[in-house]
Image (spheres, helix red, strand yellow):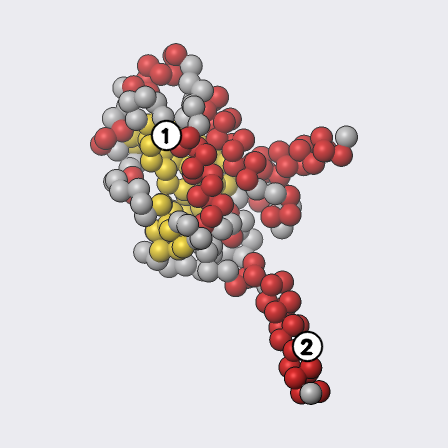
Amino acid sequence: MKYFILLFVFMLFSSISFSQNQGETRSDIVKGKKSGEIIKGKNVAYRVLKDDIYYMIKNVVIQDTLWYHFDGKLAPKKMREQIREIVYKHIKMEDLSLSYKEFEEYGFLAISFILNKELKVEKIMFFLEHGEFLRGNDERDFWITLSMDLYSEIEKEIMEMNPLIEEADKEWIREMDFTNGSFLYVKISYKGLLEALNAKESETKE
């Protein structure tokens, strides 16, 4: 009987220990993955490509040549603000483990996408900066530790939103050749994310 009690206690502590280290053992994050791997979440899968600076991830369901796009332009201001707000909404303060001090030079997420004729987001690819090339390792990186399900939620909301685009911006956007390489992009800095979450926390306390 004592043996079974001890076994139960051992299994209980092992289970607690495992749950506390899930952030390090999860398989649904980009960190540590090789180029070409497919990373799965609960209901989504992303293919990853890696170069000297970025991990690039893209939903395997989206079939197009966005991997090979180079002619990118910064998205209109109001649209950038929309997308940043979506990203900020899906990340919680407890997800952050590093101060801005550790991201003075690096630490941003880039989201590239194309628009259809109705000016709605149709394709998305995430660029996650890693530090292996510039810092020698990726221990301080943040974006590559977020789950694929979180990226999927962000992606879905961006594709469902009604983009805020002023008439002057619509003119040059309609001239872009999205079929043959053009795309728009937004950059979200770790600093901006940290400031937004701090502001949200202050509002809640008030």
Helix, strand or loop at label 2? It is: helix
Q: Position of residue 64 (x, y in %)?
A: 25, 40
Rendered residue at 45%/34% (across/down): 157
The mark found on residue 9 in the picture is 2
Rendered residue at 38%/12% (across/down): 168
Q: Position of residue 191 (x, y in %)?
A: 59, 38
The quadrant of the picture occupied by the N terminus is bottom right
Query: In front: 167, or 7?
Result: 7
Q: Position of residue 25 (x, y in %)?
A: 52, 63
The amino acid type found where label 1 is placed reads: Val
Q: Position of residue 8 (x, y in %)?
A: 65, 78
Q: Is residue 21 above or below residue 50?
A: below
Picture quadrant where residue 201 is located: top right
Q: Is residue 70 above or below residue 118?
A: below
The disc, 1 or 2, on the residue closer to the chain's N-terminal end is 2
Query: In front: 61, or 94?
Result: 61
Residues at marks 1 and 2, CA–CA distance in whole angstroms: 52 Å
Q: Residues within 10 Å of mark 1 (few under 14, many from 20)?
A: many
What residue is shown with label 1?
A: 121
Q: Is residue 131 above or below residue 63?
A: below
Q: Quick check: 193 left or right of 165?
A: right
Q: Nearer the viewer, mark 1 or mark 2?
A: 2
Rendered residue at 51%/52% (across/down): 145
The amino acid type found where label 2 is placed reads: Val
Q: Residues within 10 Å of mark 2 (few under 14, many from 20)?
A: few
Query: In front: 53, or 86?
Result: 86
